[in-house]
Image (cartoon, grey):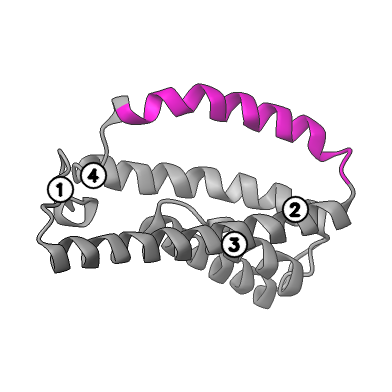
Amino acid sequence: MKESRAQKIKYAAAGLLAGAANGFFGAGGGIFIIPLYTRWAKLDEKRAYASSVAAILPICAVSAAVYLLRGGVEPGEALPYLLGGVIGGAVGGRMFKKIPPRLLRRAFALLLICGGVRSLIIGQLRNSLREFQDAFGVPRAESAKPPIETQL
C-alpha cells in the first residue's frame, strides 16, 4: 500500500512527539505514537503497537546517547534492568500475536492510568514530606547525586 504525503507527514509528527516525550521523560513515546498511528495514520491496533516498538527503539537509543554524553546516566546503573527488559521484551513479543486488540487497548489504557496516578501520588507525597520537613526544621536527606536536570 502506497502512503500519501499527508500520511507520511502524520507519521513524522507522531515520531516527533514520541521523540520529544522520550527526551523529556526518558520514556513515554508510545503514549503519543500509538494513538496517532491508529487515528491519524489509520493503522490497525496490532500494527500500531508493533510499529511503535520499531520506532521507539532508535528514539530510545538517541535519547540514551544524549543522556550518556551529557553525564545524566551511569551505564552501570542501567545494566541490572537490561536483562529483565530483554527477557520481558522477548516474552511480550511472542505473546503479542495471541492477545486480542481489545485486550491490548485496555491494558495500554490501564498502564497509562496507573502511571499517571502513581506520578501524581508520589509527587504529592514528596511535596508534603518537604513541607513537613521545612515546617518542623527536619533536615532533608541529601542524595548522593544532584538531580538529573542539574547534570544536563
Q: Amino acid at mark 1?
A: Pro
Q: Amino acid at mark 3?
A: Ile
Rendered image: mark on residue 72: 4
Q: Amino acid at mark 4?
A: Gly
Q: Quadrant of the N terminus?
A: bottom right
Nearer to me, 75 or 142: 142
Which numbered disc flags the more N-terminal residue, 3 or 1?
A: 3
Q: Find the distance from the CA under tag 2 to the CA under tag 1.
A: 35 Å
Q: Find the distance from the CA under tag 1 to the CA under tag 4.
A: 10 Å
Q: Nearer the viewer, mark 1 or mark 4?
A: 1
Q: Find the distance from the CA under tag 3 to the CA under tag 2.
A: 13 Å
Which numbered disc flags the more N-terminal residue, 2 or 1?
A: 2
Which numbered disc flags the more N-terminal residue, 2 or 4?
A: 4
At label 4, counting other C-alpha atoms closer than 10 Å, the crowd grade (few under 14, some 14-19, many 20 or more) is some
Q: Which residues are magenta?
A: 77-99
Which numbered disc flags the more N-terminal residue, 1 or 4?
A: 4
The residue labelled by disc 1 is 146
The residue labelled by disc 3 is 31
Q: Is residue 68 above or below residue 51?
A: above
Q: Find the distance from the CA under tag 3 to the CA under tag 1.
A: 28 Å
At label 1, counting other C-alpha atoms closer than 10 Å, the crowd grade (few under 14, some 14-19, many 20 or more) is few
Q: Secondary structure at mark 4?
A: loop
Q: Residue 39, percent across and down?
A: 74, 73
Nearer to me, 13 or 97: 97
The residue labelled by disc 2 is 107
Q: Is residue 134 above or below residue 115?
A: below
Residue 34 falls left or right of residue 122: right
Nearer to me, 1 or 106: 106
Q: Residue 53, percent across and down?
A: 63, 46
Which numbered disc flags the more N-terminal residue, 3 or 2?
A: 3
Measuring 38% from the left and 66% from the top, which residue is drawn there?
124
